[in-house]
Image (cartoon, rainbow, N blue to C red):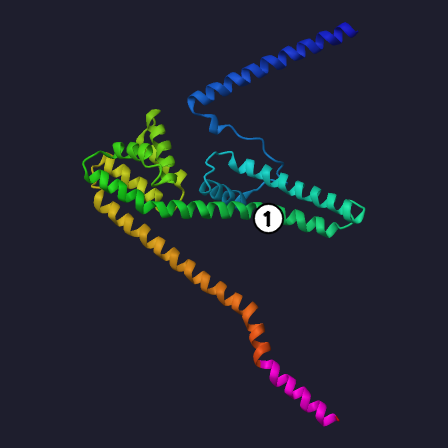
Amino acid sequence: MGALFLFCALIGGACALAGARMLLADRRLESRLGMSGERPALRLPEAFAARGRDRSEIAGKLMLAGLQDPRAADWFAWARMAATVGAALAVMLVSRLAWGGLFAQPLLIVIATGLAYVGTKQAIHIVAARRAQAITAEFPFLLDLMLMMLESGISLDQCFRSIARDEAVAVPHHARLIAMLVADIDRGMRYELALDRWAARVAVSGAKELAALFRQALFQGVELAPALREFVREFTQRRVARAREAMGGITVRMVVLMILFFMPALFVVLGGPPVVAIFDTLRGISQ
């Protein structure tokens, strides 16, 4: 009986090893063909995973934050669940040490898990907003560089390669994205698809229109210089509008700070002596 069990175990191990080798070979083939991004990630149960509008919003923000992998939404779901469970365990440990029981403060556990669950999504929003702001701020410099290169007589393809190779200091975010565009073209991808992938990686307003303009210049001979000047003007106006918005936000914060810290002291200084005089008068009348 023991020999039969050992034989079955060996057969099962050999089958598992053969299956693992076939799986590794399949993944190597997918990576060589550029299809590794299509393989789905391990998903959470439907009760905990993001669905519908929430999932599409998370996927859009992750793409804007620079996470372009199709499985990024599933990875984020796992990370959010891990952060939520970690926050609950941390609060339970603190509750054990401070109050003598894991569930001595159940309301605190609920609040901590809720904040961790919501805070992970807000963190993605903050990262996405910062990246979008950085990319939008670099757009006028990028388009100015492209305009100077195109007016000097080089082609659009040479312009892409020059920016990816030499302009990593001037436009670091766009240089990395254009390097990915050049890598897609060098792998034999068609320009239309490569430009669409570039616009999806940039993921800010105006990127798709710019990619369409590049396609028209490559395949229809449309002159780029006037359109690029319009794009430069548009992105410059966006930077000015954002600067004005930031200045307005600073003014509001300064008003709030003045109300919180200066107004009470001002009330004490202005209203203190009359109040003291009124109390002295009432005390004298009572005597």
> x, y (%) of residue 235?
32, 50
The residue where tag 1 is placed is: 118
Q: Position of residue 137 (x, y in %)?
A: 37, 48
Image quarter (top left, top right, bottom left or bottom right) of the C terminus: bottom right
What residue appears at the point 51 percent right and 16 percent down from the top-left corner? 25
Q: Which of the two residues, 278 or 193, is positioned nearer the viewer here? A: 278
Residue 96: image quadrant is top right
State the residue in front, 66 or 190: 66
User: Looking at the picture, which amino acid does disc 1 mark?
Assistant: Val
Q: Is residue 258 above or below residue 21?
A: below
- Is residue 276 one of those drawn in magenta? yes
**Residue at (63% x, 49% y) in the render:** 115
Mark 1 Cα-neighbour bin, 10 Å: few <14, some 14–19, many ≥20: few
Q: Which residues are magenta?
A: 271-286
Say if 69 sits above or below 278 in the image: above
Horizontal and vertical percent for residue 111? 67, 51
Question: Measured along the vertical axis of the image, is residue 95 above or below residue 269?
Answer: above
For the N terminus, which image quadrant?
top right
Instruction: Pick out the residue farthest to the top.
Output: 3
- Element at label 1: helix
Question: Residue sitting at 63 percent across and 15 percent down?
Answer: 16
